Image: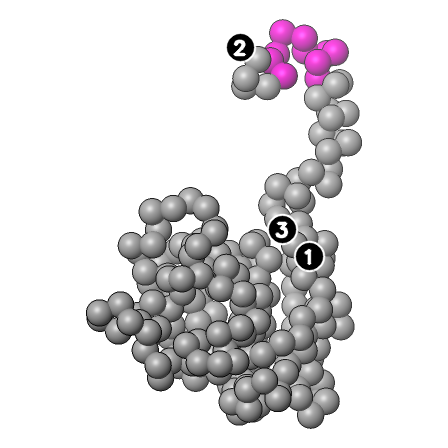
Amino acid sequence: MQPFTTLTGVAAPLPVANIDTDKIIPSRYLKTITRAGLGKGLLDPLRYNKDGSENPDFVLNREPYRHAKILIAHENFGCGSSREHAPWALMDFGISCVIAPSFGDIFFNNSQKNGLLPIRLPREICDLLIEDAKQGDNARISIDLEKQVVTRPNGEEIHFEMDPLRKHLLLNGLDDIGQTLQHAPAIEGYESRRTRTQPWFPTTLLDD
């Protein structure tokens, strides 16, 4: 997982509440277990017409938002069913941060475990950032995770709250496996002692 430290880029305004995970990435895209290519299906019901053509009115189909790194939405983003493909699709498209007043709990946790930063800010602040984002390429937004600050195009800094453990993991690019491997010396020491004191006990499930 790539560390998340700072980010500056175009933000796409999506002033819609209750964007569920089926809208973020519909179930027909879930046949794959890899992350590559899911960006094409991101927000499919909103991005594409029934004939498969792009909806020219949708924000991610317009410049400069085709290259957005940040998405700003309204309440309850990522609600609905559990699917890790939702943050995968956002990141494959190029979005590394979503700002909203609230998130679906499972999406919120899945995002952080996959390197995508979800930031909770009050609705009135999100609306200010949405207005900033509407200015397009001339209004880039910056995020500093270490300082826990979102910087508007006018230079105003907005503080956001962050769980200390999740912050540490994102800053260091540690997923669940990486977090466990931080304790590798202690694990190896335990296994070594157990081998000496309980030699009849298999060291791994794959010993056979």
Secondary structure, mark 2, is loop
State the separation of the CA atoms marked 1 and 2. 38 Å
Q: Confirm whether residue 106 shows in the render.
A: no
Image height of 5 relative to 123, above or below:
above
Instruction: Please determine whether, in this image, residue 177 is positioned above or below residue 117.
Output: above
* Residue to which mark 3 is pinned: 1
At horizontal 58% and vertical 79% (from top left) the residue drawn is 10
- Residues at discs 1 and 2 in contact (Cβ within 8 Å): no
- Looking at the rendering, the stretch of residues picked out in magenta corresponds to 194-203
**Residue 27: % across, % down:** 30, 56
Callout 1 secondary element: loop
Q: Is there CB contact under 8 Å for labels 1 and 3?
A: yes
Q: Residue at x 54, y 67 (%)?
A: 95
Dominant secondary structure (helix, strand or loop) of the stretch shown in magenta: loop
Q: Is residue 157 visible?
A: yes
Three-letter amino acid code at the position of disc 1: Pro
Q: Is the residue marked by circle 2 packed among few (<14), some (14-19), or many (20+) residues within 10 Å? A: few
Tally of numbered discs? 3
Q: Is label 1 or label 2 in front?
A: 1
Q: Which residue is mark 2?
A: 208
Q: Earlier in the sequence, mark 3 or mark 2?
A: 3
- Identify the residue at image location x=39%, y=55%: 82
Kindly identify which residue carries mark 1. Answer: 3
Q: Nearer the viewer, residue 81 or 6?
A: 6
